[in-house]
Image (spheres, coloured by chain):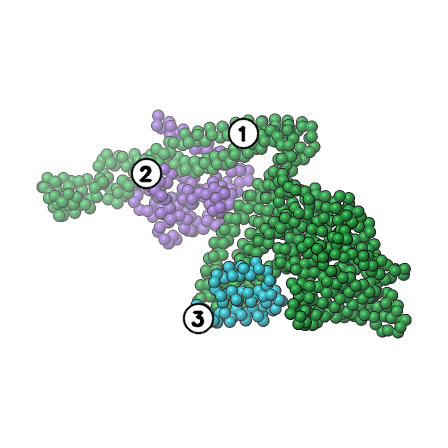
Chain colours: A green, B purple, C cyan
């Protein structure tokens, strides 16, 4: 847990000298009250300047005025000073250790716009009290450890950021990058990258001994890259389909909510589905027809030839010119041995004479005759099969006619349903819903086909990758000079696989936990029980809010609900990532009015029971709704900032 | 020309230019699909026999100028029931007998090399006719399919007349 | 160094009892999160482990 103890600002912009203390009470809620232009935003800028030497929050005067307070510069000039020191001291406690950050820069009084190098020092005091001071690079690292720059936007907010929290351009990966930074998943990702580069280095070393290795490694690299790319595409298509599915369900609910439309909508869907089934059946019928054509064209073309062959063989058989089923060689062996080769009984004189006359009868050469006997049955079957063509083609014709007739009936029904739907009184909305629904359905269909193709290609690529990897390993093993490099690469590969599992696991866990925690916080903050069913967060950390009807409703939420969701997301982020820090919000309710301010105030107060919340508000923002919630009993501190008469210096009044 | 005596050959030109076009267009369902289950897949044996049948109908044998192995002998028996007739190699020998009878050389009917040569030359004719169909911009696959079916109907009615 | 308990738990899980590997993975990740150059620390640790494995006859 991290909180700010005090901020001490000297000569920084409007703040000639401002000291803000943040003592802790039951609610760690702190208010800084000031009109616009008095220096509220520059308190956030002062903190950022102290930590990072940056001033990221807009204040129009910062562009024209020097960093050093003008009154101080004028005083310095009058007193003959060369420089005046701008100094910001930020004191925080993080996990029982105190960090005292001090950044200072000497600004020349005569040329105050000249850039000078500032110095940052940090005094670290652990619970045992033994302080240590660091500066330079160590101080910078210390600042980044306590306030990681990438998550700065989830610690320090202004109201514009809160309102546009979820309006990010497509492909904006800032939230994902930030979360990966806070949760240290970035470290795992970077390690994987370094390991991959190292493995390539090892291959390069091995390639100097075996040039073919480079080729094989390139082949593996290309396949891995292709598979990764295909997986990304498949996931995007699946996400897109999930989104389309939810939209279709939402549109169906709207259509079915309109009574006169409900039955016709369902009928329309059924008819469309039935027509699709008929289309599939027609395609299958076409495929069957092609099979029939390729088979029977051959059989019919060969029919006259086969018929003649059958007749020829029959004539030869009838004339006894073909070998019988008894092998003539068996007959010869029987005669030589004077015994039947089958039953082993001795041959009589009559039997031997009979066998000799059989041999003499084989007028056709043994081989040719044997071949004719061999093919006889098959050729006969071919003739009988050819005759079946007419029945087969008739079956197809009948089936096709039935399909065509059925389709015509369905198309007529569909036309009638569409006509009825078009006469509906709420025609514009209904037409639009149908149009959207059809577009989503078509897009789903297209995506499904694409997913199928990509999955097939990917599966094939994975098989190829396995083979390529096996070849690579084989090639590596063949060169004994590569042993050391290969051994290093093996270790690196093993580590890389472990890290890839960790990265995937932890990323998924974070997203799931973010969904759960965001919903928990949002339920607590929004005061509307049971209005929202769930929160979904995709891989790019785009947030979808789903109501109890299963409809996505972020777009229809009020500004306050938007901001509360942003707050809930941020609180979940702090919890889930393990970087639990304070929140500093500049004019949180600037864009929110009336009852919604009450909701937001209640939400922030609840939050302040668990973490420090510092708010800067204008007097118009500090309306009755806020005053009712942020009573003196409920807030730990309140400070009012006022400009002095010269309007060049801020004065603090502690309330 | 043909080195291994365990397969049927087609010309290099046919293998390089005609068969790929048949595959790409999935012509009459005779092309070999990419294996993803979404296209018609016919075996090479079916394609060879179909081309051979076209050549037989044309009545012309075209000797092969070059040789590229296309189907193994073992492909024709297949799993033992090719086209519902058992061993389709029998059709090759039947065709060989028909040709050899014209030359009074029926004692060569058992010679596989002789039978192979005859089948290959009829198939070669058939492939070149298919190339003509593919090149002809005035006819599409549906027209060829309809013409083929019409021809088959005529052949089938010829059978009926014979039977009666 | 790595402070996310979820990552630490999974280092243990995915190294499945191999203490040497667990230490190595943890070291590489700690160095990575502290911004140390991989070439100066991680690479050396990997090569050391490879030599030790060779010596163990793995």
Q: Chain letter of disc 1?
A: A
Residue A21 rendering spot, x and y as whole percentages: 76, 61
Same chain check for tags 1 and 3: no
User: Left or right: where does residue A191 sit relative to residue A482?
Assistant: right
The residue that label 3 is drawn on is C56
Indicate the secondary structure of the residue bearing disc 1.
helix
Label ID, residue C37? none
Q: Is residue A150 above or below residue B159?
A: below
In the image, residue B44 sits, relative to residue A63, either above or below, namely: above
Q: Dot 2 lies on which element?
A: helix
- In percent of width and height, residue A324 lies at 22, 39
Local packing at callout 1 (Cα closer than 10 Å; few below 14, some 14-19, many 20+) is some
Closer to the camera: disc 3 or disc 2? 3
Q: Kindly indicate whether the residue at mark 2 contacts the one at mark 1 (C-beta within 8 angstroms).
A: no
Residue A16 x %, y %: 83, 65
Residue A119 in the figure: left or right of residue B9: right
Residue A96 vs residue A388, the one in the foreground: A96
Q: Nearer the viewer, residue A237 or A252?
A: A252
Closer to viewer: mark 1 or mark 3 = 3
Q: Quadrant of the C terminus of chain A?
A: bottom right
Return the chain for callout 3.
C
* Alpha carbons under labels 3 and 2: distance apart: 68 Å
**Element at badge 3?**
helix
The residue under the point 70% across, 47% down is A562
Q: Residue at label 2?
A: A378
| Residue in view at x 16 percent, y 45 percent | A341
Q: Name the quadrant of the N terminus of chain A.
A: bottom right
Whether residue B162 can be seen here: yes
Identify the residue position indicated by label 1 in the image.
A407
């Amino acid at each position: 847990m991290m909180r700010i103890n005090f901020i001490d600002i000297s000569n920084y912009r409007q703040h000639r000298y401002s000291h803000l203390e943040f003592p802790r009470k039951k609610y760690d809620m702190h208010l800084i009250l000031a009109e616009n232009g008095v220096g509220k935003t520059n308190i956030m800028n002062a903190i950022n300047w102290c930590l990072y030497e940056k001033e990221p929050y807009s204040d129009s005067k910062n562009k024209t005025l020097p960093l050093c307070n003008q009154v101080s510069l004028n005083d310095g000039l009058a007193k003959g000073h060369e420089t005046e020191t701008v100094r910001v001291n930020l004191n925080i406690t993080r996990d029982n250790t105190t960090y005292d950050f001090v950044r200072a820069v000497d600004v020349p009084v005569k040329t105050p716009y000249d850039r000078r190098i500032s110095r940052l020092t940090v005094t670290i005091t652990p619970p045992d009290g033994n302080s240590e001071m660091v500066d330079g690079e160590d101080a910078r690292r210390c600042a980044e450890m306590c306030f990681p720059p990438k998550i700065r936007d989830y610690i320090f907010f202004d109201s514009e950021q809160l309102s546009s929290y979820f309006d990010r351009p497509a492909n904006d990966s800032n939230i994902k990058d930030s979360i990966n930074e806070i949760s240290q998943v970035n470290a795992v990702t970077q390690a994987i990258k370094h390991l991959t580069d190292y493995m390539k280095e090892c291959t390069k070393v091995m390639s100097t001994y075996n040039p073919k290795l480079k080729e094989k490694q390139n082949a593996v690299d290309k396949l891995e890259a292709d598979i990764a790319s295909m997986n990304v595409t498949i996931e995007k298509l699946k996400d897109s389909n999930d989104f389309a599915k939810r939209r279709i369900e939402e549109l169906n609910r709207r259509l079915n909510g309109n009574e006169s439309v409900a039955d016709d909508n369902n009928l329309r869907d059924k008819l469309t589905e039935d027509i699709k089934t008929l289309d599939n059946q027609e395609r299958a019928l076409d495929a069957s027809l092609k099979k029939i054509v390729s088979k029977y064209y051959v059989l019919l073309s060969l029919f006259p030839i086969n018929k003649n062959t059958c007749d020829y063989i029959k004539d030869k058989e009838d004339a006894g010119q073909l070998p019988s089923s008894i092998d003539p060689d068996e007959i010869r062996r029987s005669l030589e041995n004077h015994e039947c080769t089958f039953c082993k009984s001795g041959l009589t004189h009559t039997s031997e004479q009979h066998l000799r006359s059989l041999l003499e009868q084989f007028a056709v050469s043994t081989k040719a005759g044997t071949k004719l006997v061999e093919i006889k049955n098959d050729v006969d079957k071919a003739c009988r099969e050819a005759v079946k063509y007419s029945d087969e083609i008739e079956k197809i014709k009948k089936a096709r006619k039935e399909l065509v007739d059925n389709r015509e009936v369905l198309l007529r029904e569909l036309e009638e349903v569409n006509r009825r739907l078009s006469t509906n009184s709420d025609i514009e909305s209904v037409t639009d819903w149908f149009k959207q629904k059809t577009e989503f359905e078509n897009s789903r269909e297209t995506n499904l086909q694409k997913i199928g193709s990509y999955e097939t290609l990917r599966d094939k690529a994975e098989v190829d990758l396995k083979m390529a990897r096996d070849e690579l390993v084989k090639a590596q093993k063949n060169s004994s000079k590569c042993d050391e490099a290969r051994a290093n690469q093996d270790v690196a590969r093993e580590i890389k696989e472990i890290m890839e599992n960790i990265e995937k696991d932890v990323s998924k866990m974070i997203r799931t936990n973010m969904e759960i925690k965001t919903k928990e916080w949002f339920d607590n903050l929004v005061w509307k029980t049971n209005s929202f069913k769930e929160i979904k967060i995709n891989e790019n950390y785009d947030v979808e809010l789903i109501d109890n009807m299963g409809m996505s409703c972020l777009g229809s939420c009020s500004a306050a609900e938007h901001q509360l969701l942003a707050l809930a997301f941020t609180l979940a982020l702090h919890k889930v990532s393990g970087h639990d820090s304070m929140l500093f919000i500049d004019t949180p309710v600037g864009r929110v009015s009336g009852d919604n301010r009450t909701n937001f105030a209640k939400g922030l107060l609840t939050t302040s029971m668990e973490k420090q919340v510092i708010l800067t508000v204008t007097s118009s923002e500090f309306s009755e709704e806020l005053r009712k919630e942020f009573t003196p009993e409920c807030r730990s501190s309140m400070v009012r900032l006022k400009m002095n008469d010269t309007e060049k210096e801020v004065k603090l009044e502690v309330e | 020309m043909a080195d291994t005596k365990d397969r049927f050959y087609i010309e290099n030109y046919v293998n390089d230019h005609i068969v790929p076009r048949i595959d790409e267009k999935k012509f009459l369902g005779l092309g070999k699909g990419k294996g993803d289950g979404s296209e018609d897949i016919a075996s090479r044996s079916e394609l060879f026999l179909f081309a051979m049948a076209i050549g037989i109908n044309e009545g012309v044998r075209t000797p092969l100028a070059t040789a590229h192995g296309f189907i193994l002998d073992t492909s024709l028996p297949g799993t033992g029931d090719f086209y519902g007739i058992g061993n389709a190699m029998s059709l090759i020998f039947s065709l060989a007998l028909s040709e050899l009878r014209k030359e009074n050389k029926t004692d060569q009917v058992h010679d596989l090399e002789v039978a192979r040569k005859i089948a290959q030359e009829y198939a070669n004719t058939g492939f070149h006719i298919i190339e003509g169909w593919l090149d002809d911009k005035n006819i599409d696959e549906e027209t060829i399919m309809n013409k083929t079916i019409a021809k088959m109907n005529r052949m089938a009615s010829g059978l009926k007349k014979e039977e009666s | 160094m790595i402070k996310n308990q979820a990552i630490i738990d999974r280092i243990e899980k995915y190294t499945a009892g191999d203490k040497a590997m667990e230490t190595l993975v943890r070291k590489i990740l700690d160095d990575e999160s502290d911004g140390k150059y991989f070439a100066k620390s991680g690479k050396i640790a990997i090569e050391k482990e490879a030599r030790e494995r060779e010596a163990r006859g793995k």
